[in-house]
Image (cartoon, coloured by chain):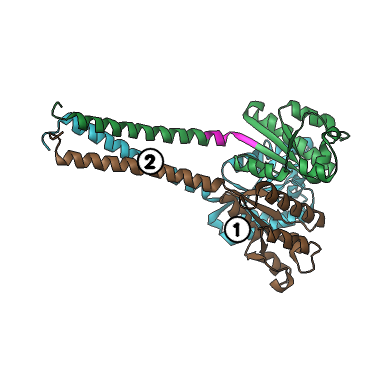
Chain colours: A green, B cyan, C brown
Amino acid sequence: MRQVSNYARSLMMAMLIIGLGQGQALAQQDARTQVVQKTKVVFQVSDGDSRKWDLALNNIKNVIKDMGRDNIEVEVVAYGPGIDMFKFESPAASRIEEVIKMGAHVVICENTMRAQKISKADMLENLGYVEAGVSQLIKRQQQGYAYIRP
Amino acid sequence: MRQVSNYARSLMMAMLIIGLGQGQALAQQDARTQVVQKTKVVFQVSDGDSRKWDLALNNIKNVIKDMGRDNIEVEVVAYGPGIDMFKFESPAASRIEEVIKMGAHVVICENTMRAQKISKADMLENLGYVEAGVSQLIKRQQQGYAYIRP
Amino acid sequence: MRQVSNYARSLMMAMLIIGLGQGQALAQQDARTQVVQKTKVVFQVSDGDSRKWDLALNNIKNVIKDMGRDNIEVEVVAYGPGIDMFKFESPAASRIEEVIKMGAHVVICENTMRAQKISKADMLENLGYVEAGVSQLIKRQQQGYAYIRP
């Protein structure tokens, strides 16, 4: 053992550290993969049909109940004729409030609002807003969200 | 060569083994990625519209023919008004039997069945059942299934 | 330092090279992951409803404007009743030409064309063709495209 020079010992330690570093890199990669696999879902609401809204609301409630509120992240993206669901006078208002209390997030497309010449004052409370609803749906899928179009 | 002590030789062998082990880990990771890339698809049937059912059945037949029965795994998830497609008296019954024989799996949402107060006796044969259809669609996407909503 | 034999020095160099090679493999893997994360989206057009066509065209324009033409790849897959959108006499013809000029690609399902007994001469210009529209939608999702069904 004493026959090995300091130079060789340093080199071997360096290589051992490189080796351990790479093991760690792989472990971190696995951790990142697990984060992606956490259950996240984005619902698209783009129809002006109130039966579709009821179906979407049932879907959201069932998923949160079935998977457990702490195990799922639900986002609803409304655009086009679908934003009517979240207007102040919406027939679904009380049920929407209910799913928001259950933890669902709702985001509305500002492109659609401009096209319809309406403002946030015309919408229900506790909503979020994004520039383009479709871009949001794309980004969420890229982030590992499942996509449901009721 | 004899000047290198046993200690140094053991250390070098250990590092070589670590190195090979990491190479293997990367190879396994590639293998896992390939498994995810095997073609799997889940079809959503949530409309009570029989033209949509015909379109879904055409889609499923075309995909199985186009990709080859052994290269694709097809699952159909029916919920909401879509479960009518798979009821005993369904006008699509014979064509459904045909795609099931071609290898497609069908699963029905039990939440919807409870809401409609119907039982498995009211449904066609050779179907599977899940607690919540939407949860199934989410899980399948997380498992790498493509999603098609006809 | 001179006490370390040539054999040992070669072995250490070999291990260092293996180590660096693995670092490179991880870096390449990250690069591949980034390619997958480049924004790509496939739009499904399968309805014979011209309001849906307008919504799809608005969606495509908004996404290209919002994300920037160089940052997004947009493909439109038309099948079933949806191929009417791209027929020669389509009311949406001029707007379709516009989104194609903005960089969107359109592909039409040849299975549907055969079923409708129509040929490419019946369709608009600058379109692509695939054997089965649904297979294309599946392949694109497997390649990391987000999926939007307007």
- Report the residue marked by disc 1: B64
Residue drawn at (69%, 71%) of the image: C120
On the question of residue B40 being in view, the answer is no
Asked if residue C30 lies left or right of residue B10, the reply is right
Q: Quadrant of the N terminus of chain B?
A: top left
Q: Which percent across, then down, holds residue A44?
A: 73, 42
In the image, taking residue C124 as reference, residue B33 lies left or right, namely left
Identified by mark 1, the residue type is Ile
Crowding at mark 1 (Cα within 10 Å: few <14, some 14-19, many 20+): many
Write down the region rendered in magenta.
Answer: A34-40
Distance between the alpha carbons at the discs numbered 2 and 1: 41 Å
Q: Which residue is mark 2?
A: C23
Q: In which image quadrant can residue C53 be found?
A: bottom right
Chain identifier of the residue bearing label 2 in the image? C
Between residues A133 and A147, which one lies in front from this camera angle?
A: A133
Q: Quadrant of residue C9?
A: top left
Q: Residue furthest right?
A: A89
* Displayed quadrant of residue C49: bottom right
Q: Position of residue C17 (x, y in %)?
A: 29, 43
- Residue type beneath disc 2: Gly
- SS assignment at label 1: helix
Nearest the eye: A91 or A143: A143
Residue A134 is situated, as x and y percent measured from the top left of the image, at 71, 45
User: Secondary structure beneath disc 2?
Assistant: helix
Q: Is residue B26 magenta?
A: no
Please tell me which residue is depicted at 75% across the width and 25% down the height of the picture: A101
Label 1 resides on the chain identified as B
Where does residue C68 sit, x and y in percent of width and height? 65, 49
Q: Tell me how many marks there are.
A: 2
> Mark 2 Cα within 10 Å, few/some/many (few <14, many 20+)?
some
At x 63% / y 42%, what residue is drawn? A141
Q: Is residue A138 visible?
A: yes
